Image (cartoon, helix red, strand yellow):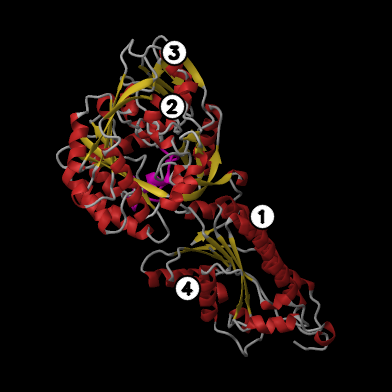
């Protein structure tokens, strides 16, 4: 029995807001704070220690799962801390606040001939969020995750201390906070080494592959290109299971672009507001709703594959950085196309040898259960040194599932089975996408050592357990510990 | 979340909703009754499905803090049911301000204090359901218990206003207008005849919540009875004795 007595509210009611995941499939109330400088973050930490509330960190809210939701408690949205602090166009070293976005980055530096060394499929995440999830791009084999390009960061810890971390200095914390999902501290500045480029174009090669084996083989054979990515039609069955289209891309060497000053300009890179010159991109997601069901997506995927195999097969063309990297931004609000229930993304990372068999099993299972993924994306990965890493020597397959009130339970059962298949194959998962793992699943792929190390660091940086999110409750807390802090 | 859950319609509704798989936060003044109900519900479910919180709805100034604590404890709140209230016996010739105030405090002002919090949350969330256990007694000012009729009429109007504000934000507001239900409150007021069972009332409310109805009379035929009563001309109504 809880006794409710003379307690005044500690969190201001005017901060109460709906906090969602990017896919709009999860939502919870939260008291959202949007500081503009680190002093306000320190004040909030102090208040949380005194009053006993928890704080979930949030950047642009682009995580597909529950990484930036802290139900019923405080949410610290860092998107207003987004100043560029220092930029050296000679060395390509950029120092920014955590709310600086990928879009801010390329618009700021590309004109000087520097591009983000690791770019996600959308330009809207914040760099703080990118570091917290230790994101990868279509160049993971070549460039590793974004954490490998961080020269230094400063952070404010919930214990009140400020720290500076580099790969050498405070190396443990460096390798844990990057990929640590904002559970150890708040980045206050991030110093990145950017990639020198000599043109705003990439040399792109596109071709089709008839099944999953060939898609994976092509991904592996082409991993020495700067970028390699495969699209997979997850709705096709039989011999065409896992058929798809490959894209490789390479940076242009110096001198190959006759007019780099032109192609490196931000305005030159920007996506046009209209598709095919006439259809406003902003309205497309409304039409997508009409096709976002099993028969509709089967038709769309088949049509796309047929075009890729015929007109689009074995094509080479130059494409701007923005158009190649930020595919997800082609259609603004595309995730709304999935309707009211939204979507979840489900991404597994499997060792090279096990990938084909396991994913064939997964794709068949999805189709048998009437829950085919509407989109599949394959990438090549390599291991890295970060504590909560999702990477391994192998491939990843990202799947998008539509969520409705009716399929929610079936989808949960399906993803539990998919998790089992992935774990049996030695697979790993990615917290930026995940909304399905249990604490036992997370332990199974991360290993007891990594979890113990992470806990030890958290006890040190956050002894009061202030930094919490729904993802933390789900993946890092066992039943007994669940209410230790709240 | 049910406010006024230790007995009567509130307790019966807690049982109905627990059977339907709801996780419940139960609030009431009487700790022992509330505790017993919680244990009963959790034992029946075989897991922790209900949590109890003692609270007097007339402690208005505590309510914002309590609401925040509940939100932090529960993580999210989908439905808020206001079922609290007292109905002291009032004789035909009695004009007792203390009794009237006790009714207005618990039936109306407590509801405003709690449902204002719920409305804020649901409006921001763009979803949720507010359920007010009002009464058919609020449809017309009858000779029996003016304070009760006035409080319930006020409560019904308050709920209607919330509905008109919040429907456009995706929030459903359900006004429940029971007739004579077999509860401690009714029996305490000396009404023992023609009572409708509390568990049936609760089932009807749970169904109405599921269907996201707006106004529901229980039992259903009260809708027609009250229609007749509402349209009874005053010169007739003044001469009636109920």
A475 within the magenta span = yes
Sequence-earlier tag: 1 or 4:
4
Give the magenta part as a residue range.
Answer: A463-486
| Residue B15, numbered label | 4
| Residue A39 image position (x, y, % from top left) | 55, 27
Q: Nearer the viewer, mark 3 or mark 4?
A: 3
> Counting other residues with Cα less than 10 Å from the Cα at mark 3, is it few (<14), some (14-19), or many (20 or more)?
some
Task: Name the side, left or right, on which B101 lies relative to B121.
Answer: right
Question: Is residue B147 visible from the viewing direction of this image?
Answer: yes
> Counting other residues with Cα less than 10 Å from the Cα at mark 1, is it few (<14), some (14-19), or many (20 or more)?
few
Res A143 → quadrant: top left
| Residue A261, numbered label | 3
| Residue A187 image position (x, y, % from top left) | 44, 28
The chain that hosts pointer 2 is A
| Residue A155, numbered label | 2
Q: Nearer the viewer, mark 1 or mark 3?
A: 3
| Residue A278 image position (x, y, % from top left) | 51, 36
- Dot 1: element: helix
View extreme (left): residue? A353
* Residue indicated by mark 1: B61
Task: Name the side, left or right, on which B142 lies relative to B31.
Answer: right
Mark 1 and mark 4 in contact? Answer it, CB < 8 Å.
Answer: no
- Dot 4: element: helix
How far apart marks 1 and 3 lie (CA) works out to 65 Å
| Residue B71 image position (x, y, % from top left) | 52, 53
Magenta part, dominant SS: loop
The chain that hosts pointer 1 is B
The chain that hosts pointer 4 is B
The residue lying at 60 percent from left, 86 percent from top is: B195
Q: Nearer the viewer, mark 2 or mark 3?
A: 3
Mark 1 and mark 3 in contact? Answer it, CB < 8 Å.
Answer: no
């Amino acid at each position: 029995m809880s006794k409710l007595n003379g307690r005044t509210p500690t969190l201001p009611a005017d901060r109460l807001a709906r906090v969602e995941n990017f896919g709009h499939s999860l939502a919870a109330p939260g008291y959202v704070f949007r500081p503009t400088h680190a002093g306000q973050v320190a004040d909030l930490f102090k208040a949380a220690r005194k009053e006993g509330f928890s704080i979930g960190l949030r950047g642009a809210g682009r995580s597909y799962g529950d990484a930036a939701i802290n139900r019923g408690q405080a949410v610290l949205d860092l998107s207003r801390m987004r100043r560029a602090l220092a930029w050296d166009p000679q060395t390509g070293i950029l120092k920014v606040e955590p709310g600086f976005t990928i879009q801010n980055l390329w618009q700021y530096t590309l004109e000087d001939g520097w591009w983000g060394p690791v770019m996600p499929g959308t330009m809207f995440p914040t760099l703080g969020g990118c570091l917290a999830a230790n994101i990868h791009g279509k160049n993971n084999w070549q460039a590793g995750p974004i954490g490998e390009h961080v020269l230094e960061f400063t952070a404010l810890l919930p214990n009140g201390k400020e720290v500076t971390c580099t790969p050498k200095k405070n190396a443990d914390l460096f390798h844990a906070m990057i990929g640590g999902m904002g559970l150890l501290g708040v980045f206050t500045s991030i110093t990145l080494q950017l990639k020198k480029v000599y043109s705003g174009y990439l040399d792109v090669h596109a071709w089709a592959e008839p099944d999953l084996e060939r898609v994976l083989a092509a991904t592996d054979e082409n991993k020495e290109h700067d970028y390699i990515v495969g699209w997979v039609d997850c709705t096709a069955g039989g011999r065409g299971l896992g058929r798809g289209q490959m894209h490789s891309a390479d940076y242009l060497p110096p001198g190959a672009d006759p007019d780099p000053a032109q192609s490196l300009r931000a305005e030159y890179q920007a996506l046009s507001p209209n598709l095919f010159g006439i259809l406003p991109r902003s309205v497309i997601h409304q039409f997508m709703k009409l096709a976002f069901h099993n028969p509709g997506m089967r038709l769309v995927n088949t049509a796309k594959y047929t075009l890729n195999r015929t007109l689009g097969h074995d094509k080479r063309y130059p494409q701007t950085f923005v158009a190649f990297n930020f595919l997800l931004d082609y259609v603004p609000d595309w995730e709304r196309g999935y309707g009211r229930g939204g979507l979840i993304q489900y991404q597994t990372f499997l060792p090279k040898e096990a990938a084909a068999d396991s994913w064939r099993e997964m794709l068949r299972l999805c189709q048998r259960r009437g829950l085919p993924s509407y989109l599949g994306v394959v990438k090549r990965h390599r291991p890295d040194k970060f504590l909560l890493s999702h990477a391994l020597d192998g491939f990843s397959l990202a799947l998008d599932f539509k969520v409705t009130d009716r399929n929610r339970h079936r989808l949960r059962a399906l993803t539990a089975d998919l998790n089992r298949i992935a774990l049996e194959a030695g697979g790993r998962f990615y917290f930026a996408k995940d909304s399905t793992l249990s604490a036992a699943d997370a332990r199974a792929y991360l290993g007891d050592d990594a979890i113990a190390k992470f806990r030890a660091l958290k006890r040190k940086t956050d002894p009061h357990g202030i930094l919490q999110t729904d993802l933390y409750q789900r993946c890092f807390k066992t039943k007994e510990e669940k209410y230790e802090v709240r | 979340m049910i406010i006024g859950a230790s007995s009567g319609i509130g307790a019966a509704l807690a049982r109905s909703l627990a059977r339907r798989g709801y996780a419940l936060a139960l609030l009431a003044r009487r700790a022992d009754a509330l505790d017993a109900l919680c244990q009963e519900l959790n034992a029946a479910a075989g897991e922790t499905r209900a949590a109890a919180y003692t609270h007097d709805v007339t402690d208005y100034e505590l309510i914002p803090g309590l609401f925040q604590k509940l939100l932090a404890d529960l993580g999210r709140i989908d439905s808020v049911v206001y079922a609290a209230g007292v109905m002291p016996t009032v004789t035909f010739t009695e004009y007792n301000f203390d009794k009237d105030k006790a009714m207005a405090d618990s039936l109306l002002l407590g509801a405003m204090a709690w449902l204002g919090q719920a409305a804020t949350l649901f409006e921001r969330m763009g979803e949720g359901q507010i359920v007010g256990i009002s009464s058919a007694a609020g449809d017309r000012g009858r000779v029996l218990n003016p304070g009760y009729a006035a409080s319930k009429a006020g409560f019904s109007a308050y709920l209607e206003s919330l509905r008109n504000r919040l429907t456009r934000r995706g929030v459903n507001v359900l006004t429940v207008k029971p007739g004579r239900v077999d509860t401690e409150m009714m029996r305490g007021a000396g009404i023992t005849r023609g009572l409708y069972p509390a568990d049936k009332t609760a089932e009807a409310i749970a169904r109405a919540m599921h269907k996201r109805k707006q106004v529901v009379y229980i039992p259903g035929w009260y809708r027609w009875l009250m229609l007749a009563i509402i349209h009874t001309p005053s010169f007739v109504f003044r001469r009636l004795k109920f």
